[in-house]
Image: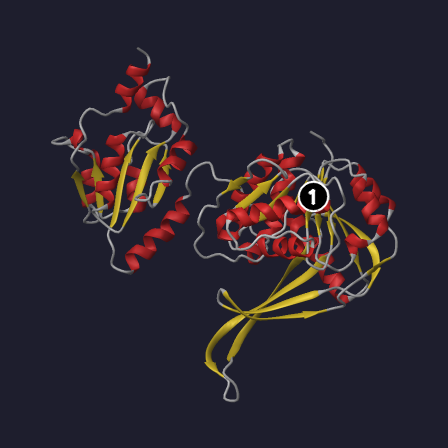
Amino acid sequence: MSAGPVVVVGDALLDVDLVGTASRLTPDAPVPVVEDLETRERPGGAALAAVIAAQATRREVVLVAPLADDDGAARLRALLDGRVRLVAVPATGGTAVKQRVRVGDHSVVRLDSGAPAVTLGGLPAEALEAIRGAAAVLVADYGRGTTSDPAVRAALAGAGGPVVWDPHPRGADPVPSVRLVTPNAAEAARVAAAAGVTADGDGLAAVGARAEGLIRHWGVGAVAVTLGARGALLSYGEGAPMVVPAVPVTGGDPCGAGDSFAAAATLALADGAVTGEAVAAAVGFAGRFVAAGGASAWDAPAVREPDVAAEDGVSALLARVRATGGTVVATGGCFDLLHPGHVATLRAARGLGDCLVVCINSDDSVRRLKGPTRPLVTAPDRARVLEALEFVDAVVVFDEDTPVEVLDRLRPDVWAKGGDYAGADLPEAAVLRRWGGQAVVLPYLDGHSTTALVQRSRV
């Protein structure tokens, strides 16, 4: 694992969102009248990938990109200042500016300006030094000619760390021996067809065949085809490919998802991950990036994997359910080893309302309740297992000995516990009465408990 920087090489763009409202159509055409416009500028292309990487790592991030001497470049420099180290490559051709007109979360039209290509004026020594000493390099190709320049290609061939290449239909082929290339499904299909790879459809078999063909065509180590909501397929050119499913994302802005995927894979390789680990990390990171607002939220706090389920996301879920008059159900416990008794209780609890929030004890809370040898499974992993159940809508981790405080924050309509509490004086019942909620006991599937499982495993 190198201590060097992560270097992003490619085409830097200036992205502008013009966000407004629309309540009527123009009288001369069936198009909306967008009013009350607010202008939001952000780095685009390789510049966005560099900013995403910088937010997610403690390493220095260096952006090597051609920049002209114009107003767009000056605005882009100001956005990057203090976020990444910019090594500007002298260039002519003007700064590419992409403007989206948006109403709420929907784009109405995109307006592109600036020359389609740039001409580089030589690669500065500072850029060569950064690439040679890099822990990993990300090539963010946006088809403006940067990756076709002989000096740039020679520098990338001698990079100090693994190279990830995010290609573009108008860009150059990756430099041979690149560790990982990350086309999306459409890009992979287009290049594969041009290279004579025959594969019909968009199923995994066809995607895998294209990926294998691209590895031979480009002479690279691996290809990860990003599949949007389906995740990504990773091929090494032989053997069965690895498929990394994506966690479903509701809402969000998919703009910049490819940049976030490539940036996350590059960071993982810089930290010593193998290619499969890097792709798996990148799929998860890209999903969180989109859910957090995508490129529109580029200057928000870093998109990191949460240790436990975040309560702010749960609040949004509860607000949606309550807005339609629905019933919020909650249940709780340690859920240290998920067994059929847990599953039966959770399924029954979900049947009492329109969403189910599971409140689980933190690791420290479990230790206080069950002893120093517990939990057997950490809170983040317990939360992930529970969230994978179709009848669980959200998981919240609490650190207290009882869920009274978390219930006071969530205020569910129903609090459900398994039948082993039948007749017991639940401390949560009094709390539920404060807002008119009801504590109930559900039938218990006899003969199943985590303690019994642990005891049997030690026999």
Residue furthest left in the image: 423
Q: Tell me: 154 left or right of 431.
A: right
The local crowd at label 1, few if under 14, some if 14 to 19, many if 20 or more residues have their Cα within 10 Å, is some
Whether residue 118 is situated above or below residue 275 in the rendered picture: below
In this rendered view, identify the residue nearer to me: 228 or 422. Answer: 228
Q: Nearer the viewer, residue 22 or 445?
A: 445
- Using the rendered view, name the quadrant where residue 453 is placed: top left
Observer-nearest residue: 172 or 99? 172
The answer, for residue 292, to whether it is visible in the render is no
Please state, as top left, top right, bottom left or bottom right, where the N terminus lies in the image. Answer: top right
- Can you identify the residue that label 1 sits on? 216
| Quadrant in which residue 108 is drawn | bottom right
Q: Position of residue 27 (x, y in %)?
A: 50, 88
Locate the C terminus by quadrant.
top left
Give the residue displayed 62% in from the left and 32% down from the top: 274
Seen as rendered, the residue at the extreme bottom is 28
Q: Where is residue 2 in the image (x, y as percent from the top left)?
A: 72, 31
Q: What residue type is labelled 1?
A: Arg
- Residues 206 and 67: in front is 206
**Residue at 30%, 44% in the rendered image:** 391
Left or right of 359, for residue 268: right
Query: Looking at the picture, how far across and down is residue 163, in whole percent?
Result: 71, 41
Count of numbered marks: 1
Q: Is any atom of residue 28 visible in this view?
A: yes
329 relative to 150 in the view: left or right: left
Q: Picture quarter containing residue 441?
A: top left
Residue 414 versus residue 332 in the image, above or below: below
Give percent across and percent down for residue 456: 28, 15
Residue 136 drawn above or below residue 141 = above
Residue 330 in the figure: left or right of residue 35: left
> SS of the residue at dot 1?
helix
